[in-house]
Image (tube, rainbow, N blue to C red):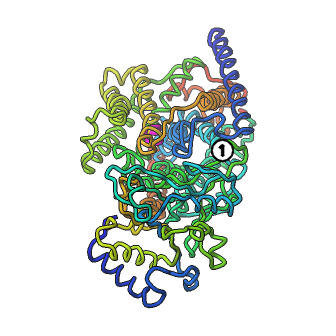
Amino acid sequence: MGMPRRRIASARLVLWALVLAGVAAAIVRYVSGLGAVTNLSDRFPWGLWIGFDVMSGVALAAGGFTIAATVYVFKLERYHVLLRPAVLTGFLGYLLVIAALFIDLGRPWNIWHPLVMWNPHSVMFEVAWCVMLYTAVLALEFGQVVLQRVRLWNVLRITRLALPPLVVAGVLLSTLHQSSLGSLFLIVPGKLHPLWYTPMLPIFFFVSAVAVGLAMVTAEATLSSRAFHHQLNTPLFTDLGRAGAVVLSVYLALRIADLVVRGVWGLLFSGSLESVMYLLELGLGVVLPLALFTVPAVARTIQGVAAAAWLVVGGVVMNRLNVAVTGMLASSGARYVPAWGEMLITASIVSGGILAYIYAVEHLPVFGPEPAPGVPREVVRSASHSVGVTGHLVQGADTAPPP
Amino acid sequence: MTLTRRHLLKLAAASSLGVTVVGPRRVAAGAAPGTAAMAVLVDVAQCIGCRLCEGACKAYHGLPAGEVTDLSPTAFTYVRFRKISKPLDHVNLGHAGANRRSYKVQCWNCVEPACASACPVAALRKTPAGPVIYDPYRCIGCRYCQLACPFQIPRFEWNRSLPVITKCNMCAERLAKNREPVCVSVCPVHALQFGPRERILAEAAARIADTPGRYVPAIYGVDEVGGTSWVYVSDVPFDELGFPVVVREALPAYTWRALGKIPGAVVALGATLTAVEAIVRRRVELNGKAGGH
């Protein structure tokens, strides 16, 4: 136990240093303007922060709604053990996206304006509303964990009844804004490179969000199992990988069909920067993990599914960056490489997210059984062995319900 | 961009109507009936590159004086100079001006502006009179307008802590008083002309038709991105002048095709999920009962 504790402690120091450095850069940004810390320009107004912090951030937070739907709508109870970490990741993810928006928006003090100043013709307006509402939904879903921690059993029992409709609302909101992040680029037919510009953008963004939502659950579980020393129930993640493979197959088929139907597949072999990035995105981020998920010898090992999951995560991040940055470069006539300030603030936001995750896991019953109020602790604990996470249950003792 | 014969005839017919009312080359400023959308014709063949429009714009909008080579938060317009590959005598400058052309660049104040459609808080808005205007009070600084604009027009104050978006507003304040944009009022040649958009298009077609062979047979802005409030005619092909090739359809429609499907999708998906939840719950309950016995 001593080893990982010390490792987490030293990692924490590094993360805090990054957070503080990012805060310093953010101060420069607020005092001197976006130009002082970014390489953005009038011809290239969106860069790393929109492509990674916002668009990839929202996609990577999709585990919250995919697992919530799996558990509460489709009632696949064996995945219940994954729900809390997924909802936590989703909730933190959205908070980080909002934090990034406070940095990226030129006039962040007006961030609330979409609430009262409406333009229903704007995709951005719809995204703003969905992100606000879904963050509220995630807060309520995660509120269950907090209620359990503070032992408000009656409130917990009552609010639990509201979960299925809340989850349905969350799935709806997620479907809308995950796809709408793709719709944002429908208005630039002459600007976004034809390999990525397609009326299918909203569909692609949604399907890839589902795939990466599932992948993030696996990626995150393998990471935290190492950090916090739990055992993982490998068959559960093998099955999750199988589900991911189905989604990836649909995604890959649609992406290829899209290139063929639009008659632009020839551009893949032009050797341009765009063609290379497109092939990398699809090859490393979709085809390779699909293969790993479907080869039984690989998919039955936790290392195998973890590798595949990380590839999916990388592939979706690449896709969002390709749409927001790579594909927009040629038409802009501008040059853009993220400035140090942009990278530092991005690293700082990610670090803040990891620190918040560690804190939540250490202080809240995120892992382990979710006790139904009134169920004796021993029953809950033994039940957990048959599901996903076993072994050391973080802070389980003081959060279990009274006998 | 290229005018069909039918198109040109139609516009010429409209122009002859204009002729009977106001004369061939003078579409009077402010002569428009109340709510007609106004437009400006820029004649690249006529422009002598004197930059009076640039200076008048800066003076009227209280911007620092001085010649510029690009739009910026302190320049809502500028005169762009382009060398041309095949020298062609200039209408006003003759042989001396054969090697280059100049033309005024500013916000096109599109008929269906992508920026206004993109703006989440309606800080950018198309007015019935023609101008696309900006309200900094509403703006959240997301810069989606910059991304959406097919002409790379909106400028952002990158080096200010309290930044705003800037662009030509077609002198909306002057239009409200039945006056033409200030740049039009100072143009010493026939390079800028202001009037109701219908008549401006007719005037453009008339200029092309009246001097056969001088102009390229095209009006840039008739149906570019669904039409613009600033339209151009030229004696040098537009691509050579650096005009962007843009789609014919208004850009907001591209978004709306997806956004318009949302209400239906929400209802369908919401109903499906609720039904699935209810069915699966019932099944789980039944299984539970069966297992309990």
x then y, percent, for residue A103: 66, 40
Viewer-closest of B57 and A13: B57
What is the residue that sits farthest to the top in this orientation?
A3
- Say which of A57 and B197 sits in front: B197
Q: Main secondary structure of the magenta part?
A: helix
| Residue A7 position (above or below residue A98) | above
For mark 1, does the 10 Å Cα neighbourhood hold few (<14), some (14 to 19), or many (20 or more) residues? some
A129 to the left or right of A150: left
The quadrant where residue A280 appears? top left
Q: Is residue A226 visible?
A: yes
The correct choice, above or below, for A82 with respect to B23 in the image is above
Q: Decide if residue A242 is in sight here.
A: no
Residue under the image location 42 percent in, 49 percent down = A191
> On the image, numbered disc 1 is attached to which residue?
A139
All told, the count of numbered labels is 1
- The residue segment tinted magenta is A320-324
- Furthest-front residue in view? B95
* Residue type, numbered disc 1: Ala
Q: Answer with the quarter of the image where residue B88 lies.
A: bottom left
> Is A96 rendered above or below residue B271?
above
Q: Any magenta on residue B168?
A: no
